[in-house]
Image: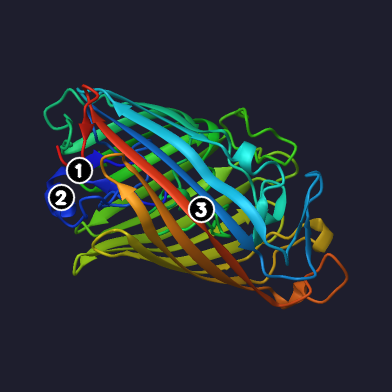
Amino acid sequence: MLLVVCAQWSGRVRAADAPAESSNVADDAGAMPYATPRQTLIPGTPGMAGGFHLMVNGFAHLQDPGLSGYTIDNPGTGRTFDAGRTQPLVTDDWVMGYGREAHGWIEGLVMLNFEPATVGSAGYPELGQSGEGLWDAQHSHQFLHQLMVAFHPLAGTAGGAARMGQEGAFDLSVFAGQGSATIGPPIFMHRASSPGPSVPRKHHKGENPHETFPVLGAAFRAGATWIEASVFGDRELTPADSRWVPHPGAPESLAGRLRHIFGEVLEGQVSGERLRDQGDGEPDAWQASASLYGWHRWRDWRLDGLLDWAIDVPALGANANGALVELAARDPSLRNIFWARSEINQREEPASRGGGVSSPWLFETLGAEHVVTSSRRAGLQIGLYGEATYVQIPSALVGGAPPDYPASHAITLDVGLHLFGMWMLDGSLRRMDNMEM
């Protein structure tokens, strides 16, 4: 199984699928084909023995949150946002490198995120968003987003041997570093059903933590079934914490996940985690997640969809649920991408709004991107995209004294450019043309 690790465009690709996939790509299209949705080989996805994979990504855009008369003002950030004014943004700007030695024993992944420079401690506006000490704003990700190493002790056996384009009947991965705990579906920045720049508001339920240090774990695969577990340090950062350096914590939290691929078109997963010592007043909590991720070819169109639910059960305070359904469609050239997301989320409200858990927020998103220029030879493409999100605000949060919201709904508009690049090399550092081997 050949692994493709990325945000926005990827999943995992079987070498046997390569000719059919590649035949549907225009000769100069830079976008990559893919098959199943798992975002990383670490934790728990084998593949690409004897190869290297490099990627780059970034969005430069203009966003109007769509709520005049409201100021996003998070304490300790030193910055405010007028929610009725257009903001220039650079987000999701990262580079990634991955490699696995030819015998399949050892692999490594490093992903550097430049949002500490382009976003900063105040984050960027997203009505209804919360996490890491911010409300109505999405926080910057850490510069060292992932740095993971894995060892495959069964790679020397007949059934566990892996090589470029082919994985064994079973696999055991033992992994460690800064990265993702074993909970939830692929996180938003690594799944093909989420090609736009906006972050799901339930992101901190059932997709988190995904840049924790340390994380130590193991995953065993037999056929199409994975059993995964990890322990990790789970410190919830604040705007005062630098995103340029890791923030280690005692690995006192734990997570487990069971997932299975049905008929090469659907991945189901159930998972849970116990979060301890989150810091900064955050209580210990349990979280659970269940999801179905499907992918399909229809008349040479590529379809990806996710149905996901998660719950946060803190030791103190009320439970909070979140759920979403999202769908992305790519035409046969992979130059035109369309997406939609429906989401409900109960937010843990800040003390300034009385605390507690809100009744559900509702979000409806539509977006599209057209690749205006691309080159398979260069491995780069630039897309022009637009996205609109309707936000329905709970009535209990509307119309009171500031900082309550002045209206019950808003429409966020977002337009911009998307840069994406991908390069795949064999063990001798020779270029592979997309999936052709």
Residue 435: which disc?
Answer: 1
Task: Say which quarter of the image contains residue 202.
Answer: bottom right
Q: Nearer the viewer, residue 212 or 49?
A: 49
Identify the residue shown where x is 78% and y is 66%.
Answer: 70
Graded by Cα atoms within 10 Å as few (under 14), some (14 to 19) or many (20 or more), the crowding at tag 2 reads: some
Graded by Cα atoms within 10 Å as few (under 14), some (14 to 19) or many (20 or more), the crowding at tag 1 reads: many
- Number of numbered discs on residues: 3
In three-dimensional space, the C-alpha distance between marks 3 and 2, rounded to whole angstroms, equals 31 Å
Q: Nearer the viewer, residue 360 or 230?
A: 360
In three-dimensional space, the C-alpha distance between marks 2 and 1, rounded to whole angstroms, equals 9 Å
- The residue mark sitting in front, 2 or 1, is 1
Tag 1 and tag 3, C-beta contact below 8 Å: no
Position in image of residue 229 (x %, y %): 41, 39
- The residue mark sitting in front, 1 or 3, is 1
Task: Say which quarter of the image contains residue 403.
Answer: bottom right
Q: Earlier in the sequence, mark 3 or mark 2?
A: 2
Identify the residue shown where x is 30% and y is 62%.
Answer: 294
| Location of mark 2 (residue) | 17
In three-dimensional space, the C-alpha distance between marks 1 and 3, rounded to whole angstroms, equals 32 Å
- The residue mark sitting in front, 3 or 2, is 2
The quadrant the C terminus occupies is top left
| Location of mark 3 (residue) | 206
Tag 2 and tag 1, C-beta contact below 8 Å: yes
Q: What SS does tag 1 mark?
A: loop
